[in-house]
Image (cartoon, rainbow, N blue to C red):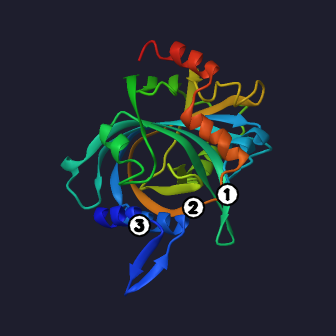
């Protein structure tokens, strides 16, 4: 199958089928490549998943999101966040438990909606993925969906306290979160109760990530055998992306809540890719997030990562 993809890349403009030459558009090629790299079902265990969520002015998110995505609005606000997830025993479905791999991963996400096949759908747009796994960084966007950047993680955890820091090797992204388990839900959250928040995130299990091809997004769906979330009280949260005031001007973004999941058996299912029209101004802004940190982000990055 890899040879097929290479052959198509060599002669991108035409494809011979039953003696006839069929002209391929770039979008046709991407569809064929997506078929060639179709992900098998992957299973494993979510050892720890922390969601740190921000409420954001939807107008700001609209400038970041590429078509066909639009911000999902909850009580007048958009929602973005950081996912810090430790995966264990990850392997193709059907392989023995002991063959699975483990990794620490981070994702910067935005709750979105889009229309596909005439139906409005909800999920998340993941505009940045980082991992401590060299395999994930190498294979992401090639063998399975989602381009991953390699990063270093420093995790200090007890059963009820968490201190997690991350710095990407390309020095474009840094995160620091200190949080403790709690039984109290924040009174100023967008969500009235923990149950409402849990239901919202359970429904947004489909995520799309950009690829190296402009306007092409790969889909991945998370399916959990059980779903249980606990609230966290956050002592400190910093993100060189969400703290960048050139992207998120002062007053347009504010911490909302944090949630914890542990010990969840799960599966990852590849989903059909999405494509958008040629690059728009919103995609140019999004491209800058991936390719070039601003001076303000660089300063934040250096201060965030001293302990990593």
Q: Toward the viewer: 293 or 65?
A: 293
Is label 2 in contact with label 1 (beta carbons under 8 Å)? yes
In the picture of the structure, the residue carrying the numbered disc 2 is: 274
In the rendered image, which quarter is residue 300 located in? top right
Query: Is residue 284 shown above or below 151?
Result: below
The answer to whether residue 64 is visible is yes
In the rendered image, which quarter is residue 158 located in? top left
Q: Disc number at residue 110?
A: none
Query: Is residue 43 shown above or below 228?
Result: below
Q: Toward the viewer: 174 or 189?
A: 174
**How many other residues sit within 10 Å of disc 2, few (<14), some (14-19) or many (≥20)?**
some
**How many other residues sit within 10 Å of disc 1, few (<14), some (14-19) or many (≥20)?**
some
Q: Earlier in the sequence, mark 2 or mark 1?
A: 1
Question: Disc 3 vs disc 1: which is toward the camera?
Answer: 3
Is label 3 in contact with label 1 (beta carbons under 8 Å)? no
**How many other residues sit within 10 Å of disc 3, few (<14), some (14-19) or many (≥20)?**
few
Q: Toward the viewer: 254 or 68?
A: 68
Please tell me whether mark 1 sits on a helix, a strand or a loop.
loop
Q: Earlier in the sequence, mark 2 or mark 3?
A: 3
**Residue at the image position 60 percent from the left and 41 percent from the top:** 287
Please tell me whether mark 3 sits on a helix, a strand or a loop.
loop
Q: Earlier in the sequence, mark 3 or mark 1?
A: 3
> Is 88 left or right of 63, judged from the image as shown?
left
Please tell me whether mark 2 sits on a helix, a strand or a loop.
strand
> Is 150 left or right of 291, judged from the image as shown?
left
Question: Disc 2 vs disc 3: which is toward the camera?
Answer: 3
Query: Is residue 235 shown above or below 277?
Result: above
Q: CA distance from mark 2 to mark 3?
A: 23 Å
In the picture of the structure, the residue carrying the numbered disc 1 is: 68
In the picture of the structure, the residue carrying the numbered disc 3 is: 11
């Amino acid at each position: 199958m890899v040879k097929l993809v290479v052959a198509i890349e060599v002669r991108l403009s035409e494809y011979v089928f039953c003696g006839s030459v069929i002209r391929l558009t770039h979008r046709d090629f991407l569809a064929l490549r997506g078929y060639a790299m179709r992900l098998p079902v992957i299973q494993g265990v979510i050892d720890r998943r922390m969601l740190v969520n921000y409420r954001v002015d939807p107008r700001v998110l609209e400038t970041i999101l590429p078509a066909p995505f639009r911000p999902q609005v909850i009580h007048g606000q958009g929602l973005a966040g950081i996912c810090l997830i430790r995966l264990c025993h990850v392997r193709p479905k059907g392989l023995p438990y002991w063959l699975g791999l483990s990794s620490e991963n981070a994702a910067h996400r935005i709750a979105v909606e889009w229309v596909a096949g005439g139906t409005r759908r909800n999920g998340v747009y993941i505009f940045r993925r980082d991992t401590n796994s060299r395999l994930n960084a190498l294979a992401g966007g090639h063998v399975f969906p989602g381009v991953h950047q390699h990063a270093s993680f420093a995790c200090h955890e007890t059963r009820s306290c968490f201190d997690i820091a991350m710095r990407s090797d390309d020095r474009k992204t840094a995160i620091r979160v200190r949080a403790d388990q709690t039984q109290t839900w924040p009174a100023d959250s967008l969500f009235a109760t923990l149950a409402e928040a849990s239901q919202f995130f359970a429904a947004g299990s489909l995520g799309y990530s950009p690829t190296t091809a402009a306007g092409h997004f790969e889909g991945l769906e998370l399916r959990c055998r059980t779903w249980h979330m606990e609230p966290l009280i956050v002592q400190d949260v910093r993100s060189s992306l969400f703290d960048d005031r050139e992207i998120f001007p002062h007053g347009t973004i504010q911490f909302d809540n944090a949630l914890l999941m542990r010990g969840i058996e799960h599966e990852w299912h590849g989903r059909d890719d999405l494509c958008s029209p040629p690059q728009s101004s919103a995609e140019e802004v999004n491209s800058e997030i991936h390719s070039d940190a601003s001076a303000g982000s660089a300063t934040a990055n250096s201060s965030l990562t001293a302990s990593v």
